[in-house]
Image (spheres, rainbow, N blue to C red):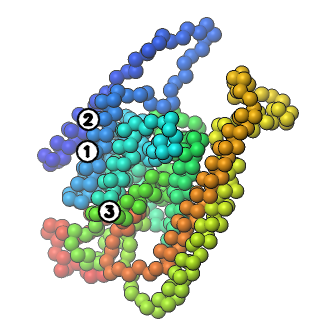
Amino acid sequence: MTRHLRFILIAFAVLSTAAAPEPIQRFPKPDFESGYERPIMQTPASRALTLEYLDVVVLIAALSLASYFVLKKRSRRYLFVLMLFSLIYFGFWRKGCVCSVGSVQNVVLAMFSNSYAIPLTVVAFFLLPLVFTLFFGRTFCAAVCPLGAAQDIFILKPKSLPGWLNETLSLIPYLYLGLSVLFAATGAGFLICRYDPFVGFFRFGASFDMILFGAFLLLLGTVVARPYCRFLCPYGVLLNWMSQLSRKHLSITPAECINCRLCEASCPFDAIKMPTAKSNEKKEQNTRRLALLLVLTPLVMALSGWAGSLLHVPLSRGHFTVALAEEIRLEDTGQRTERTDETDVFRATGKSTALLYEEARQIQRQFRTGGWLLGGFLGLIFCLKMIKLAIPSEQSLYEANRGTCLSCGRCLSYCPVGKEGVDVERIPQG
């Protein structure tokens, strides 16, 4: 083990042992004679401000090291050690919160609600991975994100998926992101946190359904590498966009590619673009297809927006106020005889049902507008993917796809270019 690696591990050990103080009880615990026991908190206790800033410092250090290991050291081994640290610190120690993936909702809520003051640490967790990705590629996904790290260690025998299936499944994160933004903007809740498949493992407690879902993803991840990162993660959409604009990015070769094809099957995420031959046979056909897609794009966006607006009623039921209004209506019209705890609490407040119905209608109108925007957004994404397929790509070397490459570094050990003691002239040319 080199001196530099020992220094890095010692520094991480010091940071990871910074223990959070026990929360101070401001009021004495209530003494119930009925045998009542206080429920166990399902969310992490609040931390001291200095420890929250420590989390940001650790995040910056981890992002910096990941970028250095990918671009300079070109070492998968160092990345793996850093990935284990991130899993322990950001996952099990910090219990998956604050999470950069879930911070999307906090930012959206702060934009649409004047009553919500977003903490600066949450803003930092949202922006820092995006900034690093803009400069260095998806190094956050490589070794810093605990959700990705949890899946990465389960990759055993990854299989390559067909291109059409990859493209189809890659639309799901856009839908998930759109729904998460819609629910956060309307105050309906945080979908990403509610359906986080791994937070139950990090906090050693979750509903049976979510534990089962998380276990399914980990089991699936043994053959389909990182299924949540590739086909569900809403934050991955933003990272994909930033990575495509990145100033620097992981390259399979440190010098000119010799097309030895050794890296061809090394990527478990199907993120290596293979060389394509230049062809002029279908150039005219592709041009007509591209022109047709450009003309149809506004129409597709309008139709998908209209379809999204039709879903405003079922989607709005995810909001507590709308769901409560429907429960009250069912009870008042005699369609339901038994009352719920929620309706009993509402009736005890003395608030008029007319005012409740009006609030529910306003929320449904917000969902109708959001449905238009969500549908139009998904229609645009679909058309852009079709346009990309209509434009033939021409390349002569093996290259990492800047958008989908997670900078995991697996391909680096396969490439003989730049390795000491390797006679490049004796390597067969592709």
The residue located at (66%, 37%) in the rendering is 321
Label 3 vs 2, first from the N-terminus: 2
Residue neighbourhood size for the residue with mark 2, other residues' Cα within 10 Å, grouped as few (<14), some (14–19), many (≥20): some
| Residue at 26% across, 75% down | 257
The one nearer the camera, 250 or 426, is 250
Residue 125 x/y as whole percent: 37, 44
The C terminus - image quarter: bottom left
- The reply to whether dot 1 and dot 2 touch (C-beta < 8 Å) is yes
Q: Amino acid at mark 1?
A: Ala
The amino acid type, in three-letter code, at marker 2 is Leu
The residue positioned 41% from the left and 28% from the top of the image is: 46
Residue 283 against residue 54 in the figure, above or below = below
Can the viewer see residue 241 in this picture? Answer: yes
Q: Which residue is mark 3?
A: 246
Image depth: mark 3 or mark 2 in front: 3
Q: Secondary structure at mark 2?
A: helix
The residue sitting at 35% across, 64% down in the picture is 245
Residue behind mark 1:
61
Q: CA distance from mark 1 to mark 3?
A: 19 Å
Q: Please give the residue where the numbered disc 2 appears in the rendered image.
A: 15
Q: Nearer the viewer, residue 47 or 291?
A: 291
- Looking at the rendered structure, the number of numbered marks drawn on it comes to 3
Q: CA distance from mark 3 to mark 2?
A: 29 Å
Closest to the camera, between mark 1 and mark 2, is 1
